[in-house]
Image (tube, rainbow, N blue to C red):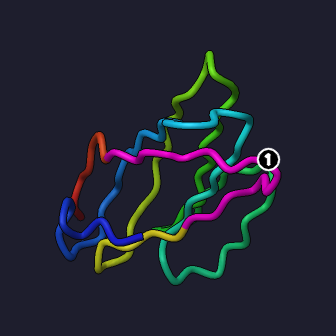
Amino acid sequence: MDISNVVGTKSSLVIIELEAVVGSDECIILFRTNGTDFEFQSGNSSSGGQHSISQGYIWDTYHPNSLIMVTTDVNGFLEFRKQHYHHNPELKMNVVFYLNQ
């Protein structure tokens, strides 16, 4: 995911809000720094050095929002994937805060 239009082409610590727009069933979205070799694992949120894995969790229609914090690569890119494949909510992602290194 390219967020360089927001943070620039720099390594940045970002907080992203996930919001379920349609179909807010249970869903887990995992984020990590682009190009890292950290493996996504269900239920874990970890960090090491300049890289991190963060987990966003959409619970149900009463809890349709989640915040994650993760570091971009030096070009402003992140990787993400859904952990639960049975649910396919339409999500809106907003950068709430960023800090360039």
Locate the N terminus by quadrant: bottom left
Tell whether 21 sits left or right of 12: right
Residue 84 magenta-highlighted: yes
The residue at the far front in this view is 22
Instruction: Please tell me whether mark 1 sits on a helix, a strand or a loop.
Output: loop
Question: For mark 1, what is the residue?
Answer: 43
Q: Residue 75: give x, y in percent of width and height.
A: 29, 80
Magenta residues span 80-94
Q: Residues within 10 Å of mark 1 (few under 14, many from 20)?
A: few
Q: Residue 65: give x, y in percent of width and height.
A: 52, 30
Which residue appears at 38% of the width and 75% of the height?
73
Would you identify the image quadrant in which residue 81 lies?
bottom right
Q: Residue 56: give x, y in percent of width and height.
A: 60, 43
Specify the amino acid type for callout 1.
Gly
Residue 97 magenta-highlighted: no
Tell whether 91 sits left or right of 85: left
* Front one among 65 and 99: 65
* Front one among 13 and 31: 31
* Front one among 55 and 63: 63
